[in-house]
Amino acid sequence: MLRELVAAAGERSFLALSGGLPPPEAFPVEALRAAAARVLDAGALQYAPTEGDPALLALIGAPNALVTTGSQQALDLLAKVLLDPGDVAVVESPAYVGALRALAAYEPRFVGVPVDADGMDTARLEALLVGGLRPKLCYVVANFSNPSGATLAFERRVHLAALSERYGFVVIEDDPYAALRFSGDDVPTIASCGGNVVYLGSYSKVIAPGLRVGYAIAPEWLARPLAIAKQATDLTSSSVDQRLVAELVRDTMWFDAHVARLCELYAKRAAALVGSLDDRLAASMPAGGMFVWASITVPGIDAQALTAACMAQDVAIVPGMEFAVDGGFEREVRLSFSQLRVDDLAEAGRRIGSAFDVLG
Amino acid sequence: MLRELVAAAGERSFLALSGGLPPPEAFPVEALRAAAARVLDAGALQYAPTEGDPALLALIGAPNALVTTGSQQALDLLAKVLLDPGDVAVVESPAYVGALRALAAYEPRFVGVPVDADGMDTARLEALLVGGLRPKLCYVVANFSNPSGATLAFERRVHLAALSERYGFVVIEDDPYAALRFSGDDVPTIASCGGNVVYLGSYSKVIAPGLRVGYAIAPEWLARPLAIAKQATDLTSSSVDQRLVAELVRDTMWFDAHVARLCELYAKRAAALVGSLDDRLAASMPAGGMFVWASITVPGIDAQALTAACMAQDVAIVPGMEFAVDGGFEREVRLSFSQLRVDDLAEAGRRIGSAFDVLG
């Protein structure tokens, strides 16, 4: 009753489970201020080399690395270099919308391969390849994928790397959430399994997205074309942002502790959200990242209806169809636990329950 | 004799007239440090809206503005939106190489229109249009062009704007050097003359290129496609960089004084360089910017030979052919006065004289 009254008075806060942003309280503001006081000199204000600031590249510590204006730019550059109109781009189904947008500008034909609890079904991909599919690239978020939350199993990583070698396509391993693991053990990267893999790292989720700093580690044959495309596209990423990131990452004691704090924050939030859902929305606890992919178990209610009913309860969720490559996901929704505090997540879960109540 | 001895000892410094970078002493390091202490908060660390940080957009003060990762990115986005392979892109002849690179990724057919002391010869362009040429875009650096140093005359700006309207192409008015005028009066922008004009501004030359902040002001019909392309390409430019720029630009008293200091710096350097050249290399004093476009007057010496002879004298210059769209400029060279101090510029001029001496 109280809640309804508050809502009527327009005071009930709107709760967004729809975004995938890190929350402001996760940003290392003080560390960045201190870093700025140290690194802002004339050297930090000149164009950086196209490949990236040498100090940051040294910390990335891989040959053939290219610093990008966020991982999003790496996707754009890879598409620019690899895709001609009509070429096949394999993506997870459901897929990260931002990647679809980056690739779509180069007019590929998207082929979705289903994702289960162990990530992309690489056996299914192999069947398509055996059947004649010849993709130019295969895009996967191997850890805590957006939107599925799934992590690609080790055997599938080995399999995917081998397929990329055998069938001559490039795997784009987009890995922005890797450090945000709060249970289980790290799985070796696809790139470490051999094959034709470009690894994309990002500091957006572990430091701050307002600094646009990501990187691509490419096979040697691809590194030079990528750097040339980068130069044509924006010459170089912000030197200031790169220096700030390098200054924070270089202090490994601080950085590890910071990441541990983030993992603790997200673990609590994930538990609060999943714990607040009743069995009308089936969701399992993710092992990291920012997303829960949940299935509606009540007959006759689809994601569109649930999303609208949630909106009426001042909760934003994203219907699964938004992540579809070729239809489907009418009964799934994506919930992000990254931006709300534990109390608000519990309240969001209650409101989702109310939305189900209204839908009957 | 002394100079030769010093050179033999490897102590003579190498003098680069080849770059087009602002020098470190032009960067407002202290102002940026102070700004960083003020603006680095959680808000500055989140993704900015794709169109740009609201505070910076307010200072730009134009409708349909889009903040870009330097002007280079605006070129990439415009090409992405406007060009299909084989489309005609009109450029100045000689042309800015970075623009050619950005556009070339989209496989246009370049058509160069000659530049004289008043910039692009728009009568020549009109003749081509009357003859059936149908460009998608026309790229010009209207103030103190790179490499020609020329400024497009007002009548030609009016003419070009009218042509863009009549023949349905987009003028890209790239204007990074506008504020760096050290003689004569400002000329109204092409965009202010009507027509289909996208105006590109940049803070790289007046604040620092290590902050990657430029902007595009587009006709209304083009603003939305550009923003969508921007989102697909890098989501948004650095929030931190945008806030830093906004913080400096907002203080108009400081900013105007800073720009006045830059103009004084560049005016002295331009005078030192031009004054150091003898009549074997004809160059006139530019009215702003960073470049002198000079012509070899000695029969039998071409730009390639002079460049090589200068290199032997530890001076780097750029032969005109580097800026050619379809041949030519074998007797021109580009000299930049932005990066060297007055004494070094005088010395560079003397060494160019020695290079001519060696060539006979």
Image (cartoon, coloured by chain):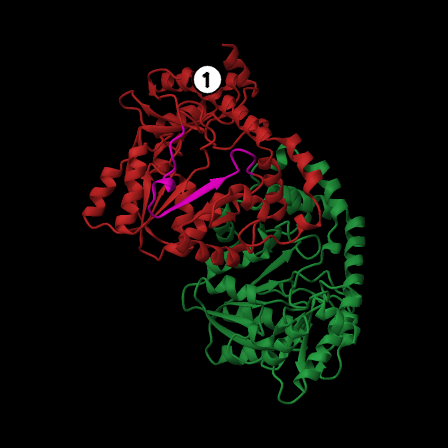
Chain colours: A green, B red
Residue indicated by mark 1: B272
- Which residue is found at the position 74% from the left and 74% from the top? A4
Image-based side of B70 in relation to A348, left or right: left
- Residue B204 is a magenta residue: yes
Of all residues shown, which one is farthest toward the left? B131
Looking at the picture, does residue A3 appear above or below residue A201?
below
Residue B162 x/y as whole percent: 28, 44
Q: Which span of residues is magenta-colored?
A: B186-209
Quadrant occupied by the C terminus of chain B: top left
- Which residue is found at the position 31% from the left and 54% from the top? B87
Q: Nearer the viewer, residue B334 or B159?
A: B159
- Which residue is found at the position 80% from the left and 62% from the top? A264
Q: Nearer the viewer, residue A170 or B146?
A: B146
The secondary structure making up most of the magenta span is: loop
- Residue A110 is a magenta residue: no
Image-based side of B95 in relation to A122, left or right: left
Looking at the picture, does residue A43 appear above or below residue B3?
below
Q: Nearer the viewer, residue A96 or A139?
A: A96
At label 1, counting other C-alpha atoms closer than 10 Å, the crowd grade (few under 14, some 14-19, many 20 or more) is many
